[in-house]
Amino acid sequence: MKISAPRIFDDGKSVVVSADFICGQDRDTLWFKLATEYREYVETERSDAFLVGLLFYAMIRGEDIEIESTISEKLYYNLSNYLIPALTLANPKLLPIKVFPAKLATESVNIGKSVGTGFSGGIDSFCTIYEHYANSRCPQGYRLTHLTFFNTGSHGDLGGDEARVLFNKRFNILKEFPKEIGLNFIFVDSNISEVLQMNFASTHTMRNMAPVLLLQKLFRVYYYSSGYRMDDFRIIGAASDTSSYDILNTAMLSTESVNLYSSGTQYTRVEKTALISKYEPTWRYLNVCASDDHNCSSCFKCMRTLFTLELVGNIQNYSQVFDLSKYSQQRKRYIAEILYNKKKYIYRDIFDKMIKRGFSVPFRSRLIFACLFVLRFFRKIIRST
Ligand SMILES: [Zn+2]
């Protein structure tokens, strides 16, 4: 793979930074688009964002990467020695490759001294905001100044118009919160999903850190909200989701200009939910739904959040963003689901909290659980005959 030097186009409203690349017989262009007001912070001298954005593209094809311009020396060192080998351990479909930049740069380019994180309205991002903005104990240099919202795959793995429409729709819903608390909200569009054509969960860290590296003149510190507690760190067998080793990913994608952190790794999801439930804006802005723009109050993410809020004693504060009567209709079935799946990662900490709290399981939930258990028993017998 050969990546050309980035170029910038400014129409007075938006800035588009792009780089052409050739990989085997394929020629394409990767681009990022953001508001012109951030132009002075867009890094065009170094190709760090394009290298990271295209890393999986090259690794899945086993293509070394030749870069026509400069990259940060620290990023080159981290990728070559640690991150590329780690990715091959996590996902055997990714092949070991080498990076050949035209030049390495050792100076920091950061001028903005800003602190940022992505904002989706979910538990993980609100936990990062609570810890680094609402919490008065957060040191000044680590206190958030900007929230971000990227079109890099979370609105549709393969991109395209449908994902872009959802991205714009979600941005319009979310933008009120940063405005209310006085934080800047940066919107970055990109064609990275269209270029990669890969599953989002297995590639999300690189996709989301590429625009951060594009803005490394602005961000001195950036938090990437974690979905895992640090003791669940795992590389082997983590091909389907890069989250379980984000502590390593973020450290290895940091440069001389920006320090990336996998934030919230000290907490379980139940602990995060308990923490943010004390933060009043979440009562009006929490948005966790896996199936809709607004909380549907019945998908697995809505149910998990609602039951956790019930366990920590704060569910009544969320009547503006959830349909609590819809939740109560499905609550007993969901409790049975937890009992049935208590060893699985996503249910484990909720089950532990139920035990610690001495939660009294409703009779109907016990009955559904017994039915599920019997069904599983018979399925096993049928399979073994
Ligand atoms: Zn939902």
Image: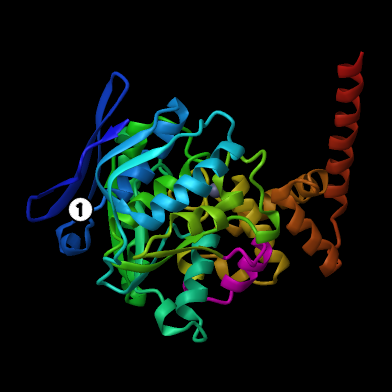
Q: Could you tell me which residue is drawn at 36 percent across and 55 percent down? A: 73
Q: Dot 1 lies on which element?
A: loop
Q: In this view, does 187 lie above or below 372?
A: below
Name the outermost residue toward the left.
12
x, y (%) of residue 4? Answer: 21, 38
Q: Which of 268 and 105 is in front in this view?
A: 105
Q: Which of 33 and 320 is in front in this view?
A: 33
130 lies left or right of 352: left
Residue for badge 1:
44
x, y (%) of residue 130? Answer: 50, 74
Q: Could you tell me which residue is drawn at 37 percent across and 60 percent down? A: 174
Query: In the picture, which quadrant includes the N terminus?
Result: top left
* 373 part of magenta stretch: no
| Residue 114 sits in quarter | bottom left
Q: Is residue 236 above or below residue 244?
A: above
Q: What stretch is highlighted in magenta?
A: 264-281
Q: Could you tell me which residue is drawn at 69 percent across and 72 percent down? A: 313
Query: In the picture, which quadrant includes the C terminus?
Result: top right
